[in-house]
Image (spheres, helix red, strand yellow):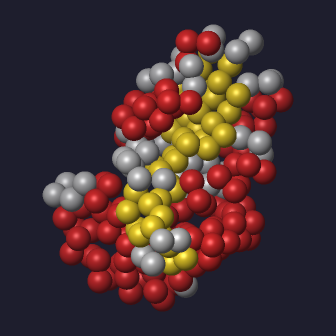
Amino acid sequence: MRNVIAFFDFDGTITTKDTLFEIIRFQKGPTALYLGMALLSPLLVLFKLKVISNQQMKEIVLQFYFRNTPIEVFQQLCNDFCRLRLPSILRPKALNAIAWHQAEGHKVFIVTASAENWVAPWSETLKVGCLGSVLEIKDGSVTGKLVGKNCNGDEKVCRIKEVVHLTTFDTIYAYGDSSGDKQMLALAQYPGFRAFE
């Protein structure tokens, strides 16, 4: 096939776990993770009831754990996470699919609601593009807020269209595992829902 592109969701599709919680565990330790989740549990209930949006909840969690962390420190720990922790939660079938697309000469992107800080260092080792949520940095530190929208649902398609001219591709593959991927999957002639479980 010529001019083929493949889009992969990250959390739950390529990984077996949600990496937001894994990056918190890695950077802050399990005790801090569980204590924080206990303190935030009333808000998590409101999130489950859809009173609080996905983006609002994510920003609350990010601010709780990472606000005022110098970006150099945060990014180094994200790099360490990609090297030391992430490999143990990757799905072999997903890695094989990425390798197959690359061997066929297809262009590949990771499109994720996770922050690019802890996905891009890994995707770069595979020479794969990364489109993810962007953390706000002020005065050299993480604020816990996002720049623009959380890269989920419709925003995944918007981010894709910002960097890819889809009409130049004859064939599109997309892989995802949740309702937040359905708009991206709808772009593809070959959608793979929970293809690697």
**Residue 123 in the image, given as x and y percentages of width and height:** 70, 49
168 and 51: which is toward the camera: 168
194 and 79: which is toward the camera: 79
Q: Is residue 33 left or right of residue 37?
A: right
**Vertically, is 46 above or below 125?**
below
Residue visible at 48% across and 71% down? 139
**Vertically, is 195 above or below 169?**
below
**Vertically, is 43 above or below 177?**
below
**Vertically, is 108 above or below 12?**
above
Q: Is residue 85 left or right of residue 63?
A: right
Residue 132 in view, yes or no: yes
**Residue 108 in the image, given as x and y percentages of width and height:** 68, 33
**Residue 162 in the image, given as x and y percentages of width and height:** 50, 30
Q: Is residue 88 left or right of residue 40?
A: right
Residue visible at 71% across and 36% down? 97
**Residue 73 in the image, given as x and y percentages of width and height:** 62, 77
157 and 196: which is toward the camera: 157
Residue 16 in view, yes or no: no
Residue sitting at the far right: 103
Residue sitting at the far front: 139
Q: Is residue 136 left or right of residue 57?
A: right
Residue visible at 80% across and 24% down? 105
Residue visible at 77% across and 42% down? 127
